[in-house]
Amino acid sequence: MSTLETRFEFGANWRHFVETSLNEARIANAVKSLRDMLALDSLRGRTFLDVGSGSGLFSLAACRLEAQRVISFDLDTESVRTSAFLRERERILDHRWTISQGSVLDEGFMAKLPTVEILYSWGVLHHTGRMWEAIDAAAAKVAPGGRFAISIYNRVERKPDSSAMWWKVKRFYNHAPAFVRALMEAAYMANHAATRLITLRNPLRAHTDQEGAGRRGMDFRHDVRDWLGGFPYEFAAAGELFEYVRRKHGFVLERLRTGDGNICNEYLFVRPASL
């Protein structure tokens, strides 16, 4: 099986999250996370494009922030169904939140989408198998003066090369039978709890959290599956990605949030109004 044929079932994971774990407190924290990342208190009157909408949670957050129009799409048909389910549950009109199935790498599909004032793609473009092309395609849909908010896995450049190690782990997870996947998830969560215990922190906090305050409204169990299974898997150092977007697209970096290790770096770029 080739790399491009190895793909995690993101939609099934996020459908389960919406059906079992999504509550009003998590939605409120997703709204706060989106507001913080975009550096905007409100999206009133703005168009919002969610590239790789997953569960639909952040498209919903954009609606809660009064975006004039929300457009979301995902490659995974189960993610599309989940977003539609969430839209129906929240009684949001179709013309205000449109949802479709498509790929950021499909030139024909992308050509049909309008340019928008805000493009949001959190933890998605590095799962396409052609990350740099995906970044180019997404950037092209940002209107002059618009915001381009993305997050991309960090490249860990020190030795040992943990980025390369996780590529192998993720690929193995996707080829493994269900019971092996379950064992890998349990081992990961146990290691997380042990690390917190060693550092004198509550080892069960992530497991018992019902609000997702530190997880953008998400929950630990589904995040673990997304992390272990997230394949294709690419990454870039913060400076590497900043220089690429600045030089190729002329965007200005408004905000950068980085962390240690393989976690996502968050970028908020702005396309100058003169371009």
Image (cartoon, rainbow, N blue to C red):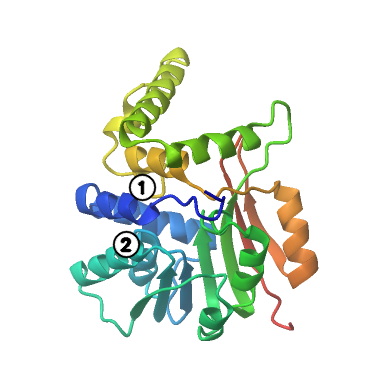
What residue sits right under mark 2 in the picture?
Answer: 78
- The answer to whether 110 is drawn above or below residue 56 in the figure is below
What crowding class fits label 2: few (fewer than 14 Cα within 10 Å), some (14-19), or many (20 or more)? many
Q: Position of residue 113 (x, y in %)?
A: 51, 83
Q: Is residue 185 left or right of residue 131?
A: left
- The answer to whether 131 is drawn above or below residue 153 in the figure is below
Q: Residue, x 68% and y 36% (percent of image)?
A: 156
Cα separation between marks 1 and 2: 18 Å
Closer to the camera in the image, 255 or 207:
207
Going by the numbered disc 2, the residue's amino acid type is: Glu
Closer to the camera in the image, 82 or 202:
82
- The answer to whether 210 is drawn above or below residue 205 in the figure is below
Q: Position of residue 1 (x, y in %)?
A: 52, 48
Q: Is residue 210 left or right of residue 197?
A: left
Q: Which label belongs to residue 19? A: none
User: Which picture quadrant has residue 79?
Assistant: bottom left
Closer to the camera in the image, 112 or 197:
112
Earlier in the chain: of badge 1 and badge 2, it is 2
- Residue 154 makes an appearance in the image: yes
Q: Which label belongs to residue 218? A: 1
- Residue 56 makes an appearance in the image: no
Q: Position of residue 242 (x, y in %)?
A: 73, 57
Going by the numbered disc 1, the residue's amino acid type is: Met
Tell me the element at label 2. Answer: helix
What crowding class fits label 1: few (fewer than 14 Cα within 10 Å), some (14-19), or many (20 or more)? many
Tell me the element at label 1. Answer: loop
